[in-house]
Every structure is written in C-alpha cells, then in structure tokens.
Image (cartoon, helix red, strand yellow):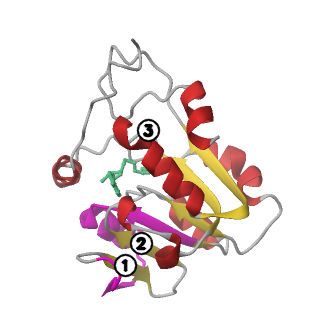
C-alpha cells in the first residue's frame, strides 16, 4: 500500500548528525517558511508574549522571527551543530548548560533569555522539564519522525500543549512509492487519527 512503502523506515540519530556534518540540509529554508507568515495570525490568535515550541527545530530562522516579535521560543534538536549555527548565523550570544533531568543533554540559551534550545532527543523531554506551550510550529518535524514513532511523538506533543494552544502543522503530499523520505508522507486521515 501507499503507506506501507515507508512504514518501517528508520533514520538514526547518527544519520541526522551526518546530514548536518556534510551540509546535506536541503530542508533548511534560509528565508524562513512562507506558510508561517501566512498563518501567523492563526498561531497567535490575538495573543502576545506566547511560549512557542519548535520540535525538531534544526536552525529554523522562524525561531528568530518569533523571538523578535516578543514571544519566547523553545526548540529541541539532536544536532548541536545545528543549534550553534542558529545562534552564530543570527549573531546571538548564547550560553550552554547541562540539563540535570536528562543525562548528556545540553540547553543552549540566548543571553537575552528568550530562545532556549535543547540538544537531545525530543523523546527525552516532558512538560516537567520544558513546561507547556501556547503554540507549536511543526514543520519538518512530524514528517521527519520515523513512521513507527508517530503516535509516541504526537502523544508527547499533546502533553506539551496548554489548553488554548494552537498547532501549525506543515506536511508534504506525494506518492510514497516514489521517494523513501524523509520527509515522509503522512496522509490527512492519519493526522486525524494521531491527534484525535
Ligand atoms: N524543523 C526544521 C528541521 C527539519 S529536519 C526546519 O524546518 O528546518 C528534521 C530535524 O530533526 C533535523 O535537524 C534532525 O537533526 C532533527 N531530529 C531528528 N530526530 C530527532 C529527535 N528524535 N529529536 C530531536 N531532533 C531530531
């Protein structure tokens, strides 16, 4: 079946780190994502000073956009290189500290304090560590998660959301027999059943 073609695909942490090391990061959008501009009002819903979560954040420039608008941004990413490139490319001074609850994890935080990026696997996080969020920008995240981990990922995301939070999700539509992913094809019906 169309979904079966990708369901057992696994991309390891080492493979992701290697993509960053070799600059194989075609997913990175230097100018930011036009869909965030288009749907910003839906994310904000008239609110200011939000806590916004960026799962599997890479070095997404949208994090800088939202921080500049006065929101506070939290991201998580396995590649420390990606996170350092984010701060360096935006000329943002940052400091590093260990995360006592997660062995081997680090938190890189802008000195101004409004961008905190966790270097660890998203599955290491919980609301007791990062709190809950008013908004989520999920681009290159659900579609990058290994297909067998989708329910675990979504269940975790739900625990990280405040009651009135908004979740912007970007997916890609294509024939999964023609491309092995990532990004993986996540059909609308599966999104409905994952998020409920
Ligand atoms: N959202 C970003 C990056 C998309 S690519 C953007 O829009 O540009 C997916 C990213 O997820 C990669 O940078 C990869 O290193 C990271 N990643 C993959 N598995 C992860 C995991 N389990 N926890 C945290 N980050 C992960």
The spot of residue 13 in percent (x, y) is: 22, 52
Q: Are marks 3 and 2 in contact (CB under 8 Å)?
A: no
Q: Is mark 1 within 8 Å of ligand 1?
A: no
Q: Do residues under tags 1 and 2 come within 8 Å of each other at their CB atoms? A: yes
Kindly state the secondary structure of the residue where label 2 is placed: strand
Viewed as shown, does residue 177 lie left or right of 130? left
User: Measuring 26% from the left and 67% from the top, which residue is drawn there?
Assistant: 80
Mark 1 = which residue?
108
Q: Are marks 1 and 3 in contact (CB under 8 Å)?
A: no
Label 3 to label 2: alpha-carbon separation: 20 Å
The residue under label 2 is 117
Dot 1 or dot 3: first in sequence order is: 1
Q: Residue at x 21, y 46 (%)?
A: 12
- How many angstroms separate mark 1 from mark 2 (CA)? 5 Å
Depth check, mark 1 against mark 3: the one in front is: 3
Q: Is residue 120 visible?
A: yes
Q: Magenta residues, as a range?
A: 73-102
The structure residue drawn at horizontal position 56% and vertical position 75%, both measured from the top left corner, is 131
Taking the image as shown, residue 4 lies to the left or right of residue 81, namely right
Q: Is residue 52 above or below residue 130?
A: above
Task: Report x, y in % for residue 154.
Answer: 51, 48
Q: Is residue 56 magenta?
A: no
Residue to which mark 3 is pinned: 143
Query: Where's residue 152, x and y in %?
Result: 44, 49
* Nearest to the observer: residue 146 or residue 176: 146
Name the one closer to the observer, 86 or 134: 134
């Amino acid at each position: 079946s169309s979904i079966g073609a990708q369901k057992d695909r696994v991309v390891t942490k080492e493979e992701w780190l290697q993509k960053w090391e070799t600059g194989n990061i075609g997913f990175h959008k230097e100018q930011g994502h036009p869909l965030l501009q288009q749907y910003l009002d839906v994310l904000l819903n008239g609110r200011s000073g939000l806590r916004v979560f960026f799962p599997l954040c890479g070095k997404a420039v949208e994090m800088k956009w939202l921080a500049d608008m006065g929101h506070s941004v939290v991201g998580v990413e396995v590649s420390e290189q990606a996170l350092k490139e984010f701060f360096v490319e935006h000329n943002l001074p940052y400091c590093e500290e260990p995360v006592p609850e997660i062995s081997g994890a680090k938190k890189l935080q802008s000195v101004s304090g409004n961008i905190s990026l966790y270097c660890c696997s998203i599955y290491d996080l919980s609301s007791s560590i990062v709190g809950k969020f008013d908004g989520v920008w999920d681009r290159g995240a659900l579609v990058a998660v290994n297909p067998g981990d989708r329910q675990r990922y979504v269940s975790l995301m739900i625990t990280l959301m405040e009651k009135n939070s908004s979740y912007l999700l970007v997916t890609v539509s294509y024939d999964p027999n023609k491309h092995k992913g990532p990004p993986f094809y996540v059909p609308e019906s599966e999104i409905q059943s994952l998020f409920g």
